[in-house]
Amino acid sequence: MLYCVEMDVRVPHDVDPQVFERLKAEEKARAQELQHQGKWRHLWRVAGRYANISIFDVESHDELHAILSGLPLFPFMEMRVTPLARHPSAID
Amino acid sequence: MLYCVEMDVRVPHDVDPQVFERLKAEEKARAQELQHQGKWRHLWRVAGRYANISIFDVESHDELHAILSGLPLFPFMEMRVTPLARHPSAID
Amino acid sequence: MLYCVEMDVRVPHDVDPQVFERLKAEEKARAQELQHQGKWRHLWRVAGRYANISIFDVESHDELHAILSGLPLFPFMEMRVTPLARHPSAID
Amino acid sequence: MLYCVEMDVRVPHDVDPQVFERLKAEEKARAQELQHQGKWRHLWRVAGRYANISIFDVESHDELHAILSGLPLFPFMEMRVTPLARHPSAID
Amino acid sequence: MLYCVEMDVRVPHDVDPQVFERLKAEEKARAQELQHQGKWRHLWRVAGRYANISIFDVESHDELHAILSGLPLFPFMEMRVTPLARHPSAID
Amino acid sequence: MLYCVEMDVRVPHDVDPQVFERLKAEEKARAQELQHQGKWRHLWRVAGRYANISIFDVESHDELHAILSGLPLFPFMEMRVTPLARHPSAID
Amino acid sequence: MLYCVEMDVRVPHDVDPQVFERLKAEEKARAQELQHQGKWRHLWRVAGRYANISIFDVESHDELHAILSGLPLFPFMEMRVTPLARHPSAID
Amino acid sequence: MLYCVEMDVRVPHDVDPQVFERLKAEEKARAQELQHQGKWRHLWRVAGRYANISIFDVESHDELHAILSGLPLFPFMEMRVTPLARHPSAID
Amino acid sequence: MLYCVEMDVRVPHDVDPQVFERLKAEEKARAQELQHQGKWRHLWRVAGRYANISIFDVESHDELHAILSGLPLFPFMEMRVTPLARHPSAID
Amino acid sequence: MLYCVEMDVRVPHDVDPQVFERLKAEEKARAQELQHQGKWRHLWRVAGRYANISIFDVESHDELHAILSGLPLFPFMEMRVTPLARHPSAID
């Protein structure tokens, strides 16, 4: 099942930069792992913002929540989740 | 270049149903034509709403506007356009 | 899978009252049918508003959308859909 | 009487992690106690957010407020309370 | 139990004036009846708007909803309901 | 003259708890003094939130502002003030 | 006592133009009468919008509401009322 | 003096198409006249919406309001006006 | 030219009180100087909020911005600027 | 391709002033460099706010994002990006 997830990253100005850089590296590794597994189907940067628009393909709401809440940057992200259904005009 | 476009259709309750059904059929034909051309890359229904989330792949803002404003249901749609850049963690 | 759906009914003041009453009766019949099937698990009235908060239990986003968009009052309703996951502190 | 309560947890990034973990454990114990008492009737996680949607069944606004304001994580939560009435189409 | 209810009246410009005046007279009679019964405890006009802020004192959410949804102007009103608990600093 | 005032208290998580408790005690004493004087006519807790809805009865905007801005918790409160006029359907 | 009132005029596109022009003329006459009486102290046009920002100087909320709700264009206006107190840095 | 003006056109679905087309033609002629005079310095289409972002260069707020409120489509437009000052980092 | 400026002061709870009191005194002196010059024409307190509504009369957007951004409390204020034109019904 | 970008700068009150001044100087140098390259076509100050409205002319969303996210003050700015198409009434 598909979900559109929009994630905005909010970095507090007094966060420890080294800690944050390490979290970013872990986030990148985890994002790529999930893409290779086919669960994180699309990942786009929103131009001009520290944000992304993503498409997830998972089995259930529980799996989606486990993935999202386990992201290293989750404590710094605001998320909007939209469940996607098949569109009657879609050709695929 | 990629754009995320979220479209909400607002149908006035006193619109002529025959007129609207004809517009919907034209919209569907046009949407499928644009998908076959590779310009309307993804088209998903937002579950529970008369709305969609779409990804367009076009040459320029001008082309995007020409396509969107030419859709048969454009007068009944509210649109939010988000330009998408490459994400540094994307694997494709 | 569970979804929380909040539905607000907007009745245009110049709608035909007979048409609307017939739609309401059909909506009620359909709502009860879906409750008996176990798909519409909970249905509560929001006090003071022509609105409800509901819990649906269906197989997929597609099934949810088919149910919601097929409701007789769908053209008059504004919906907010929230996918629900299991809570780690829930006892059931 | 039933209330829908939506709770969002906001964790300040510079909170003491040990203090917060202890509060979370206390919150979980209290949530389960209230569920066993039948007062916290449903507790669902909102997929993708550190938030829940809950149904409470209590005697009065005063009892509801006493319960909610006494939750260990109350100082970190933003709440929206909606009183629920019986829906004329509900079958239970 | 007490509830604060804020009601905004929206009058469509093309409503039949005679019909609306009759509804207003019925609304006034009903509002006074409920005040005499002690259920509509306070009724104030919001200065500069066709709106009121009211305090209701009823037995349950169901009674509140029955009263509000039965008001003659209900189809033209937008309502916000807030359940009120006892304040620890209140002297009454 | 009557005013409806809705007050939300925002407590920064890193405020000194002893300082805040002292301010709360002072706030309570001041709230009760103003109630005894008949100026703070009603004080209700909003169920589920650290907030209140109040009715003030004072001579002028200046007196209202002097009272509100002099409350011990004023620096931590967000306020919405609504001037109330007599309602033509009120019986008192 | 002073109040800042922001008024936005919403003209339905299908209103009878003659009726509306007559209401506008009446509104202008009334606005000038109230200015001569010193009750409508300032009246400014918001650049680019069919809206004004005004300062009223009246005895009470009741007088303000009587004036505003009696304006010929009141049914077409959305109003925001802000009670103004003396500022400690004002020199007048 | 410069102003950024964002204009959204709202076309009621039951407007007379011939009347609206004539207004659009008049709007275009007027927009071009104002551009030739140097008062309407920039005019861009917002991609995907019946809206524009414009820069005006006029003598005063009064002149701006006279121009905007005199546009043939003014009754169908919602406008947001932002006064622009010189930026200390601008090179022109 | 006239501008309506609404200013909200946000005081961080952990600001140095002495520094803030000194800025407030400087702000007051500057506000009075600008009033004596006729540039800050009106200054009113919003009842119940640490905020003001002001009318400025200056030569240009640049002068307005220089004045506002030079206020001692500018870093702690959120501002909304509205350019005001002459109203056709104003008598002055 | 053209983009309208509105940037609001949020300066935390406890940021190191020397660090921030250095970032501002770097931001100014970078803004001027981009203007000389023709990529940052217009840069205006929003009167009364620490904000700007800008027009960028770049090759792609990727180039826009690289420029914006590389600005020295990017971590302190909130941005709204609007893609601009050619307007049919524009004369240039």
Image: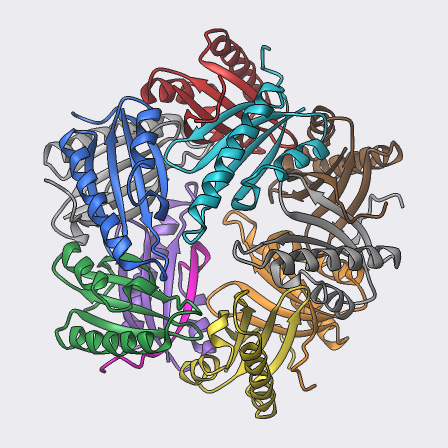
Chain colours: B blue, C green, D purple, E yellow, F orange, H cyan, I brown, J red
Q: Is residue D39 visible?
A: no
Residue in the picture at 65% in, 72% down: E45
C41 over I81 or under it: above or below: below
Between F51 and H46, the residue placed more toward the observer is H46
Q: Is residue J77 left or right of residue D34?
A: right
Kindly indicate the quadrant of the structure image that contains residue B91: top left
Give the extent of the magenta segment.
Answer: D73-92
Between E19 and I80, the residue placed more toward the observer is E19
Tell me how many marks there are.
Answer: 0
Residue E88 drawn at (x, y percent): 58, 73
C6 over E68 or under it: above or below: above
Between C83 and F33, the residue placed more toward the observer is C83
Locate the N terminus of chain D by quadrant: bottom left
Q: State yes or no: residue E34 in magenta.
A: no
Q: State yes or no: residue D88 in magenta.
A: yes
Locate the C terminus of chain D by quadrant: bottom left
Residue D49 drawn at (x, y percent): 31, 50
Residue in the picture at 28% in, 53% down: B19
I56 over D39 or under it: above or below: above
Residue C3 drawn at (x, y percent): 23, 61
F42 over B17 or under it: above or below: below
Residue in the picture at 81% in, 43% down: I42
Residue C7 drawn at (x, y percent): 33, 65
Q: Is residue B68 visible?
A: yes
Kindly indicate the quadrant of the structure image that contains residue D52: bottom left
